[in-house]
Image (cartoon, rainbow, N blue to C red):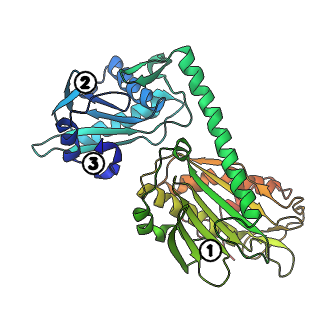
Amino acid sequence: MSISRAQFENINENDLLDLINANVPEGALIEYKRDMYGNADADKREFLKDISSFANSSGGHLLIGMDENQGVATAIVPNTDDADQILQRLENLVRSGLEPRVFGIQMKAVAIGGGGNVFVCRIPKSWNPPHRVSSQNSNRFFVRSSAGAHEASVEELRSIFSGGARLRERVEAFRAERVARILANDGIVPLANDPTSKIILHVAPLSAFDGSNAVDLAQANENRHLLPPMGETAFAGRINFDGFVNLRSGDQCFGYTQLFRNGIIEATKVRLVATEGPRRIPTRSFGEFVFQRVPSYLDALTNLGATPPALLMLTLSGLRGAVLGIGNGQVFLEEQTPFDRDTIELPPVQVDEFGDRVAVKQALGPAIDVLWNACGLLSSNEYMACFDENGRWIAPG
């Protein structure tokens, strides 16, 4: 159906009419509601049931203001109440009435030519299911089938839980395979080997692991300016077997950004550890590489139709014997101990809102803490405060 392929912000009245003209029926991926959900407790629970059933299954669309006959869309019945107030009410219900919270839901009012709006909710397949309706102590789980929403059976709940475990295994396997290839210099392109220290960053929308994502390479090319290699301004892009890649210009490759066809981004940079003087990570540069590039990569994913959440995974290599150069003046704290291993895989962190730069920086905090811990330091809080939400250094000196 066209609505599932459309960029969400571009969905309009014609997409709704296409559903009617094509006799698209309700089912596992779409549901029509003629009237807006009311304010009564039962109406709130009904709305949350519908939203959670999509999230606990394969995702889909809920369209409010579409009439149906035996499940087939027949007419647009626009709602004439204040659209902003309705959207705020629905968003608040989702935020407060489901546990755990469902991330990545998109809602919009589609203006109808004759007046009023149809409300479209796009619900992604969740990656932290199952979600229960907690409003008014309901405590019920719902899923969807071709017949619509229904309360989950014990067997269905067991399947949902095991699906989460399989996802973690797929994420770990992907990361391990990519890091191993890059460290063996068998990545997208050979990287300069001297010096050998590297940053490897993966930005992985969780939807990439179910096989449903397919990046439009023409759109990827249009968004290449949002995918620069870390720390680079001069680069060239091209389509390749794996998707789309931006490479640093020059005879040797000191870093690239690869957008895979499933929507995962892989960014690399060599020369992480400074070799002039004491071996150290220049943490101001490191922070700028990461804090400036991650929001840009997430902007690219948004433009390509990816939805939250996404995992951010940082891997650093060539560290053994180096220390952290703290701040602009490269201060070496006495309580530091040099890194005792060559490669450190920082724990994955989850980003739940792509456009919120403050939240993205906060999400990275626990991973940066682990890097500090590896040098015998308790916390990176003071360091993190040296950058604004756009990744710019704001500390004196």
Judged left or right of residue 13, residue 225 is right
Residue pointed to by mark 3: 11
Provide residue 346's location: percent of width, then percent of height: 73, 53
Provide residue 355's location: percent of width, then percent of height: 47, 55
Q: Which mark is residue 71?
A: 2
Residue drawn at point x = 54 percent, y = 63 percent? 241
Residue drawn at point x = 38 percent, y = 36 percent? 60
In the rendered image, the vertical position of residue 367 relative to residue 212, given as above or below:
below
Quadrant for residue 107, please give it: top left
Tell me the distance, in whole angstroms, between the alpha carbons under discs 3 and 1: 36 Å
Looking at the image, which is closer to me, 46 or 206? 206
Instruction: Locate the N terminus by quadrant.
Output: top left
Instruction: Locate the C terminus by quadrant.
Output: bottom right
Q: Which mark is residue 215?
A: none
Amino acid marked by disc 1: Gly
Contact flag, marks 3 and 1 (Cβ < 8 Å): no
